[in-house]
Every structure is written in C-alpha cells, then in structure tokens.
Amino acid sequence: MARAPQLPLELFSIDGLLTEEERAIRDVVRSFVEENIKPNVADWFEAGTIPARELAKEFGALGVLGMHLEGYGCAGTNAVSYGLAAMELEAGDSGIRSLVSVQGSLAMFAIHEFGSEEQREEWLPGMAAGELIGCFGLTEADFGSNPGGMRTAAKPDGDDWVLNGSKMWITNGTVADVAVVWAQTDDGIRGFVVPTDTPGFSAREIHKKLSLRASVTAELVLEDVRLPASAVLPGVSGLKGPLACLNEARFGIAFGTLGAARDCLETAIDYSSNRVQFDRPIAGYQMTQQKLADMTLELGKGMLLALHLGRLKDEHKITPEQVSLGKLNNAREALNIARECRGILGGNGITLEYPVIRHMNNLESVYTYEGTNEMHTLVIGQALTGMPAFR
C-alpha cells in the first residue's frame, strides 16, 4: 500500500535536534536560495560568471557574512546556525557557499582572530555588510597540501614590508578589496592585510574551469608590494594562523556538502517518481529504491556527524582532527551521492536543466580543496596511531 513520501532528512527527525532559532536561520537562508540562487545559478555556471558584488551585498543584508563572529557588524550566531546556513547555500551551489565561507571563515576570521583593533575596525564592518569583499592567499601553484613550503616572501625595508610571490586558486581574487596574504619572513610565516589597490598587486581570473564555474577563481601576483608595518596580523606567527582559518572553513564544508548532496537526492527522488519506464515509475523498482535508501543513510549519518561537530564547536571542545572527520566523510559521501543520482537521471543527468551534474562537478573541487581527501585521511591516521605519515 502506497504511503505519503518523506524527505530524506525527515527520516532522521533532524528538526527535533535544532533550536527554534537555528531552524529559523536555516529557513531564511533556504528561502533566499530558492528565490535568488536556484533560478539563476545554472546560467551563471554555464557562462562561467557570477554577479559577486551584487550577491555580496545581498548576503550582507541577509546577515550570513562572518555570521559566527562577534562584533564589528557580525551577527554572532552559534556554530550550528552557521553550518546550517552553509548547507542551504551549497544546496544552491558550492560556488555560492565558497563566496560566503571565504569571506567569513577565511578572510574575516583571520582579521577578527589575529588582527589589530585598527585592522578589525577598518575592514570587518564593511565586509560583514558585503560592501567590501575579501580573499585569502595561502595556496601556491606548487604548494597546496604543503603550505609550509610557500615561496611568497616578505622582506623588511625600513619601517615597511615588501612582498613578492604568487598565490593560486584564490576564490574572490579578482573582485576582492582586501587580501589576507601569508608569506615567509625571517621569523617564519606571517599574515598580511593587503588592500588590493596597492601598487604591485594584481589578480588574474582563472578560466576554462569545469567545476565551481559560478565562482570567481584567481591567481594573485605580488610584485614588490610595499606595505606598512601596520599591515601585519600581529596576533599569530607560523602555520598555526592559516591552519586555524582553514579549520573554520572546513567546518562549514562539513555542513555545506550535505546541502549539495540533499539537493541531488531530492532531485533524484522526484525524477524517479515521475520517470516512467516499462509502464511504471522507476522509483517503484527495487534497484532504484536500494540506491535511494543507501544515499539517504549516508546523508543522514553525515548530518548527524555535522551537528555533533557543531555542538562540540559551540562548547569550544572541537579539535582539528574532528574537523577532518567531518570534511573527509561528508565531502566524500556527498560526491558519491551526486554521482549515483546522476546515474538515476540517465541522459537527463548531464544537462543543466537539473542541478545534479553541476553539483557533481563542483563537489569534485570541494573533495580536494581545504585539504585533500588524502591529507585528512593522514590527519585521522596520525590521531589514531600517534605517527605522522605525511612524508
């Protein structure tokens, strides 16, 4: 006997694990994405462009830029609320969530956590409002998983610093007003707040991408960029600074990838319920139902893991290894779900009329950025054995 269908996460009664405020924030972001992102994002993806400045202002008005930070115009929400917002944004598109997370969890977090009071007051209110856009310069063409080997260098010159080098795969790079750039100094790696109109700074957009096309991706080039001493982030030195920022972003990814996976799965359920072959909907066949059930299990388990990590973060108990658990599992399973859903849609699965292949292509990037699958595996392996195996 047929019964009324349930949405995948309804089977896990997820709403009962959230507070009223968390559900309200999630629903507001979901409505924004349904009304403003989903109707447009396939066209942005196909064109390889995005109205980044307009979206930044809309996200600022929505209150999601740096939403988990305190003061300076930031909303000051808890970590779970931020995670849920990231999930809804990525249900729209990974590139959209990347715009928000690079702004808030990388650029703004670095200034908020490690900057001087003057730096915070100068940059954070405008960034929270979306009037100013930030980017985060850590990765280099030859140094992704090994950021400690970076070649970008900062040399003192009187009271100033002079930066030379380049950064690769930088989200928001060509539209940013400010870049947080990490560079080698004689005293180790330091962070610098670099206005992008500084002479010698340039950004070149990366084209011919087949993933994250609804996102600005750039190479940053620094040629004798002269900065005052006040440009240095005074609160940190060494790799612990950028790694702390990456942990913030990875936490958002643990939630965000579930949004893409959920959108794929709900699309596959709807499609298979209406696609008739051999005189019945393909959702009525056992093989299809097995696929849908298995994907629902992985989505739900990922959601429970993400929520647990969010509660730990709100209690200030989360560890980097636990963030790696979330990023590794949820990015991997989201990609697997997207691929399986692509198959259920058959030939229609390769068109932008449906969101599945767009999510699938995006997740190929999310799977490897902010720490590759292999690197997070080794982080967990070291936690289990006490032995590093990175070299």
Image (spheres, rainbow, N blue to C red):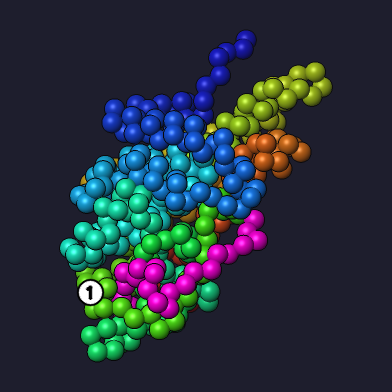
In the image, residue 352 above or below residue 211: above
Amino acid type, residue under disc 1 in the picture: Ser
In the image, residue 166 above or below residue 251: below
- Disc 1 on helix, strand or loop? helix
Residue 104 magenta-highlighted: no
Q: Is residue 202 left or right of residue 131?
A: right
Q: Is residue 354 left or right of residue 306?
A: right
The N terminus sits in image quarter = top right
Q: Is residue 347 visible?
A: yes
Q: Residue at x 44, y 30 (%)?
A: 31
In the image, residue 136 above or below residue 212: below
Q: Residue at x 44, y 34 (%)?
A: 32
Q: Position of residue 222 (x, y in %)?
A: 44, 78
In the image, residue 228 above or below residue 11: below
Name the residue at the left extreme. Answer: 117
Which of 156/279 is in front?
Answer: 156
Which of 142/4 is in front?
Answer: 142
Q: Position of residue 8 (x, y in %)?
A: 51, 29
Q: Position of residue 105 (x, y in %)?
A: 35, 55
Which of 90/335 is in front?
Answer: 90
Q: Residue at x 31, y 50 (%)?
A: 128
Name the residue at the right extreme. Answer: 278
**Magenta-colored span:** 188-210
Name the residue at the bottom extreme. Answer: 158
Q: Is residue 190 left or right of residue 351?
A: left
Total marks in image: 1
Q: Residue at x 54, y 36 (%)?
A: 38
Q: Is residue 105 visible?
A: no
Residue occupied by mark 1: 230
The quadrant where residue 339 appears: top right
Residue 204 magenta-highlighted: yes
